[in-house]
Image (tube, rainbow, N blue to C red):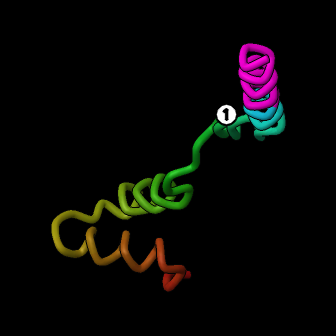
Amino acid sequence: MKVITAFAALAIVAWGAAGASVAADPPATPSATPVKHPSLKACNQQADARKLTGKERSHFVLDCKAGKTP
């Protein structure tokens, strides 16, 4: 009788654990193309076109990324 009770308890525990793992959500898939700084490349190209260097270039790129340049 004890053996049957032990098997029944084990079956209930195993069934509950299996049900919980089935109900878990699958992991989210990562984006195919991560976007880091979409405007950084364009701002650097504009700085190259203006032939800026040093501090002027740094300030221009920062302002460009912030949207402060025309």
**Number of marks in the image?**
1
At horizontal 81% and vertical 29% (from top left) the residue drawn is 12
Q: Main secondary structure of the magenta part?
A: helix
- In the rendered image, which quarter contains the N terminus? top right
Question: x and y percent of residue 66 in the render?
Answer: 48, 79
Between 18 and 41, the residue placed more toward the observer is 18
Which range of residues does the magenta coloring cover?
Answer: 1-15
Examine the structure image and report whether residue 70 is included in the region drawn in magenta: no
Drawn side of residue 44 relative to residue 30, left or right: left
* Amino acid on which disc 1 is placed: Ala
Give the quadrant of residue 9. top right
Q: Residue furthest left?
A: 54
Drawn side of residue 58 relative to residue 22, left or right: left
Q: Which residue is mark 1?
A: 32
Q: Residue furthest front?
A: 1
Give the quadrant of residue 24. top right
Vertical position of residue 41 compared to residue 55: above or below: above
- In the rendered image, which quarter contains the C terminus? bottom right
Question: x and y percent of residue 22 in the render?
Answer: 82, 30
Question: x and y percent of residue 44 in the render?
Answer: 40, 57
Between 60 and 52, the residue placed more toward the observer is 60
Between 70 and 23, the residue placed more toward the observer is 23
Examine the structure image and report whether residue 9 is included in the region drawn in magenta: yes
Q: Residue furthest bottom?
A: 68
At horizontal 23% and vertical 75% (from top left) the residue drawn is 56
Give the quadrant of residue 38. bottom right
Element at badge 1?
A: loop
At horizontal 30% and vertical 60% (from top left) the residue drawn is 51
At horizontal 74% and vertical 31% (from top left) the residue drawn is 13
Vertical position of residue 67 compared to residue 26: above or below: below
Vertical position of residue 55 compared to residue 31: above or below: below
Question: x and y percent of residue 23 in the render?
Answer: 83, 38
